[in-house]
Image (tube, helix red, strand yellow):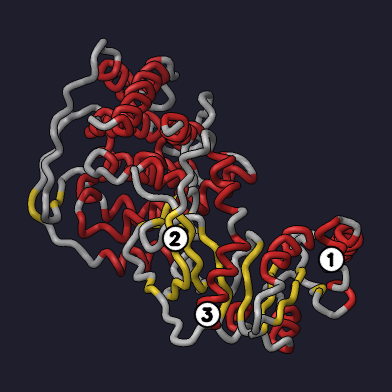
Amino acid sequence: MSRRRELICGVIRQRFGDVCVNVAAMPSLDSPDFMTRVKQLFQQDKTPEFIEWTNASVWRASALDCLTALRALAVDEPISSTQGEVSSPADFVRKLKEAKNDEQLQFELLTVRYAFPLNFLLSSEYLVQEYLLERLMVQDRARIEESSIEAVSADALLLKLNLVAIYSSGTTDLRFLDALNYYYEMLPLTWQPQSRHKWLLISFLALYARALSCYC
Amino acid sequence: MRVGILANSYLSAFRIYQQLHDLPDCDLFILLAPLPHRSPWISILANFARMIFTCFTVAGWQLSALPFNRRVVFLPHPINHPDSVAQLTRKRLDIGLLNSGIIYREPTIAAFRLGILNPHIGVLPKYRGRNVMEWSVLQGDRTGVTVFFIDGGIDTGERIVVQEEVDISQFTSISKAKQYLFDLDGSFFRKALIRLTAENSSYQINDGSGHRYYVMSQLFQGVVTELLQGNN
């Protein structure tokens, strides 16, 4: 292993340990059962042996909705799927751009398209992956840094972070993992999101931890 | 060739002027615009004071005629304001040299016959966007400077005039390495202008094949710092 890779893996392992400690110390927010299961997963002395997410090359459909599926993925449960049909990612990005000032609509668009969230791993979703990364690292970041975390919709922000965390587990492109690093450093440790789905913060941390453990 | 240095501060523009004023076939101007959030009058007064101050430095004394021969233009509005664009258009400039962190809009760029040159501290097309020096080091790639004509996107302008690898292995901190690369802007503008005034000048193409990079986390900045320190 090169020195560069050794250094990167060293800090990633440290960060993984740090995230586990913080997850263990988190209050229950709005979903105590889910929180307990996440804590169980990360309270072990060693890195959990995660179920491998198969690198599907075709779009999958799921009987679950996006948010239920995210909760399952965050506690490393498998989710069943069947072959599905998908609309063009370019059209979808256009819709997201049209809804750029309506975060609730963006949230709904994302949850409908990624009812099976592992579809976000597909290479055909390149345009959406890049668009969400840009939104997180330019517009959302600027609003939070210039004002406060309350300046953005917590649900929309956390959903984007959850999806980017899923993609980070399946790519070697460090820009995506580093967006999660950046938000982990920026979000206050005591933050309790004012949102409908507060548990998205826990699932983000769980999926972030998984992405960290996947890299090295 | 009529060339304008686009800046917010007289001092930074003068630093570039010093490195370019003796270029043959190059009619050089300094164009000072206030920052969008700053009062134009405060900006003009501050730059006027800097101009006077510069005249009393050793380097400034040799070029002390500069403020009096209509080479310094004060724009009363921010650079993308329609009045500023109209004023720039009237100057009939061929090339603008970017020396501020402002994002330039299409009409501003179009006010220059050939366009506006940007000295980007990364290798294009691979490294677009923010913190590209750090990302290059983190990923084990070469660091360098690319001078290219900007368009409305983020480091997507197609015409690359000069691109060179620059060794930063003598630096042990990110800030010093970056400052070193930023301070090469005058010499790289000089190379670009010489190339553009030469016969049969041609461009490399920025084909957009790389990635856009973003602000780097403290976690990875720590790795970059260790990599830089490991070189020494």
- Residue at mark 1 shares a chain with residue at mark 2: yes
Subunit under mark 2: B
| Residue A51 circle label | none
Q: Nearer the viewer, residue A79 or A209?
A: A209
- The type of residue carrying mark 3 is Leu
Q: Quadrant of the N terminus of chain A?
A: top left
Q: State the residue position of label 1.
A: B62
Query: Residue B196 bears which disc, if any?
Result: 3
Q: Residues within 10 Å of mark 3 (few under 14, many from 20)?
A: some
Q: Earlier in the sequence, mark 3 or mark 1?
A: 1
Spatial CA distance of label 3 from label 1 is: 27 Å
Q: State the residue at coordinates (31%, 61%).
A: A127
Residue A150's place in the image compared with A50, above or below, is below
Please state the total of marks drawn on the protein image: 3
Q: Chain of mark 3?
A: B
Residue B109: horizontal and vertical position, in percent? Answer: 59, 78
In space, the residues marked 3 and 2 are separated at their CA atoms by: 16 Å
In the picture as drawn, the residue positioned furthest to the top comes out as A45
